[in-house]
Image (cartoon, grey):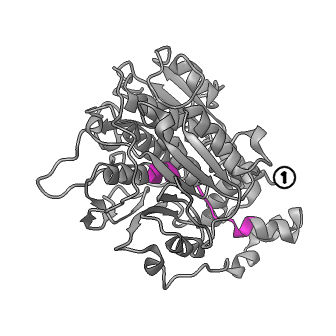
Amino acid sequence: MALDRHIARLAKILVDSENITFDEAQAKLRKLTLEVVVSTDATSPAAHAAVLTAVAIGRRTFVGGVSVTGAIDQPLNAAFPLKAENLREAVYSLGASTLDAPPSRIIVIGVAETPSGVWAISTWWNGWRAGTAQTGKAVLGDDDNPLAGIAAAALAVSAAFEAERGHCVDLWCEANLWPVGPGEEAPPFTEVYLPGALWLIGLGNLGQAFLWALAALPYSNPADVSLVLQDRDKVDEENWATSVLVKDEFYGELKTKVAEQWALAKGFDVRRIDRRFHGCDQFEDGDPRIALSGVDKIEARKSMARIGFHCIVDAGLGRTSSDFDRYRVTVFDNVRPIDKHFAEENDKAVDEAIQGYAPYQRLEAEIGTCGMAKVAGASVAAPYVSALAATVAISRLIAIASGCECPTNEVRRLSLAAPSKIAKLAKFEARGFLRAGRPTIIK
């Protein structure tokens, strides 16, 4: 069986953790199927964001296909720039399909129950909190916040994939996108301010997840949002399984162009910079002073300190089969500079020992030394990790835009039901933070 580069980075999770070949890993992945069941009560912005996200990231993880059943002939209640009148059209535009056999796993959006003896998990949300639960046990609360729906879907897809890998999964899991101090409450979603000007650096799986989450926000006038999109890389087959905006027809296109198409469809004001970010860049009038970073190199992060950003929200992901489901979101400003934070860290070369690992020796015989080295050196990744990290990062930006405290740092592994490791809360003084009004909720 030839190496399928579309799922190579996902297959590496199985190869590196289960001591199987790429042929065996690919065969396993192609058998994975997922059914998303939409309950009759799943009509809110959070519910529809959960359905659409479950499809968009689920089909890149459950490679055999994702079907959507239940109450899908309802008007679309989501701010994503999709050409669809109802939920059915929207899910099929994102790649939903019909399954020929019972699914491997089931995700329920809402409170519908599933037949006994079938592994299934439900999603729930309440304001800035989101999570998963046993089917029939989910309790839905405030449902205006689409970020909570995205987070719930990411946790559900993660749990379903871990169950398929034979891991013990706790069906109850929670993410809190707006941690507060003792005795305090997070503000209602309708009372916050949305970010109005951002510089996105890096448009791979994290950068595209940022744009997915931003596009879910119900801006009253998206044209008020100014984005600078910066990257130099082009889309290839390896990006399909990890990056939520990638389609087959995008191979060979610049990642900035793919991101630009999505952002323009939303109605954002967009400018592209088709080169690598470095410390020699200088601001021009009107450039956003707030950076949203999804790069994978330490040196690139350090160089951001030389530009003069007022605030940087930086996300990072794990790279190996043992930590691929780990994310970190950190907020930097003049008081907490990014270069000092990473001062003792450097970009490390990939361990050459992996090239002696039997599955990679077999792969080298198939695609040559250069091809094998590229696959061996690539990070493993799953799109549900970047989806959850993006909701945390965008929530931090909303908190800063709203003049509220937020954590300086958060680290979490999705496979652990325990709460995130969250640093102390702080207020970030971002002089150049432009606001684009409050969310517009249409009931």
**Coordinates of residue 128 in the picture (x, y in percent):** 30, 43
Of the pair 218 and 159, the residue shown nearer to us: 218
Note whether 379 is above or below 27 in the view shown: below
**Coordinates of residue 289 in the picture (x, y in percent):** 47, 59
Of the pair 18 and 348, the residue shown nearer to us: 348
Of the pair 296 and 240, the residue shown nearer to us: 296
Question: In the rendered image, is residue 116 in sight?
Answer: no
At 70% across and 76% down in the image, what residue appears? 354
Is 362 displayed left or right of 173 in the figure? right
Judge whether residue 259 is colored magenta: no
Where is mark 1, residue-wise?
2
**Coordinates of residue 389 in the picture (x, y in percent):** 46, 54
Q: Residues within 10 Å of mark 1 (few under 14, many from 20)?
A: few
At 51% across and 64% down in the image, what residue appears? 316
Q: Main secondary structure of the magenta part?
A: helix
Q: Which residues are magenta?
A: 375-390
Which quarter of the figure is the C terminus placed in?
A: top left
Question: In the rendered image, is residue 10 in sight?
Answer: yes
Is 353 displayed left or right of 172 in the figure? right
